[in-house]
Image (cartoon, rainbow, N blue to C red):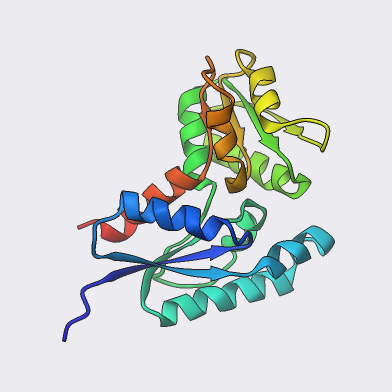
Amino acid sequence: MVDDVTRLGLVHTVPALAATFDDLVTDAAPADVEAIHVVDPWLLRTALASGVGPEVVDRLAAHVAHLRGRGVAGVLVTCSTLGEATEQVPEPDLPVLRVDQGMADRAIELAGDGGRVAVLATVASTLGPTERLLHRSARQAGRAVTVEAELIDGTGTTEAAIRRWDGRVDVVVLAQASMAAAAGRAGSTATPVLSSPELATRRLVELVTRV
């Protein structure tokens, strides 16, 4: 019997995101695409406690190798704190995508040359990687942008921060996949608000199902 199912691998550090991305894959992919999830909160705990060091990269690489052994056609790492670690995973001929790449590219497209981007995060470890990614995407697009960042502490909400930046920048970026629902709760805004889950899932599906 020929197995004609296309498998996608997803690595999560927040358990609740597995169901979110499973729904996104179902919505974005043909019926013969199956998602295989790996959930490892240790990766994020360790990254927050001691940084994204070799042990985090090695463990992430082990998960990707496991998924490769399961026959996946591509892997999406859904934790933005691990974005730069994702790019260090050595898997020739297997696409391994960071969750925020599609969002960053879209943000630069919307901001335009000389535009301003606001990055919002509730975890400090996501700010640096997201800012660096945005600047890299801008360089690759031949554009210059100004990136401003805000860490939302326990006294504020993402929705309030979105409204605070509305009209002051060309695009607002939510640095963590877990923040995505806040965009809808913030209501209508003049400034586009981007989150990573849908854009990342679409990019992975398009990449592995391309004829």
Residue extending farthest bottom: 1
Does the rendering let one see residue 162?
A: yes
- Residue 201: image location, x then y, percent: 42, 51
Horizontal side of residue 62 vs 149, given as left or right: left
Question: Is residue 161 or residue 99 the one in the foreground?
Answer: 161
Does the rendering let one see residue 140?
A: no
Q: What's the residue at 70%, 47% (across, down)?
A: 126
- Residue 103: image location, x then y, percent: 50, 40
Horizontal side of residue 147 vs 74, given as left or right: right
Q: How many marks?
A: 0
Residue 158 against residue 100 in the figure, above or below = above
Q: What's the residue at 51%, 31% (across, down)?
A: 108
Q: What's the residue at 58%, 74% (across, down)?
A: 61
Q: Quadrant of the C terminus?
A: bottom left
Q: What's the residue at 34%, 55% (across, down)?
A: 26
Residue 80 against residue 50 in the figure, above or below = above
Question: Is residue 111 or residue 191 the one in the foreground?
Answer: 191
- Residue 23: image location, x then y, percent: 41, 53
Q: Quadrant of residue 187?
A: top right
Q: Quadrant of residue 157?
A: top right
Q: Quadrant of the N terminus?
A: bottom left
Horizontal side of residue 20 vs 46, given as left or right: left
- Residue 69: image location, x then y, percent: 42, 82
Residue extending farthest left: 1
Residue 128 against residue 69 in the figure, above or below = above
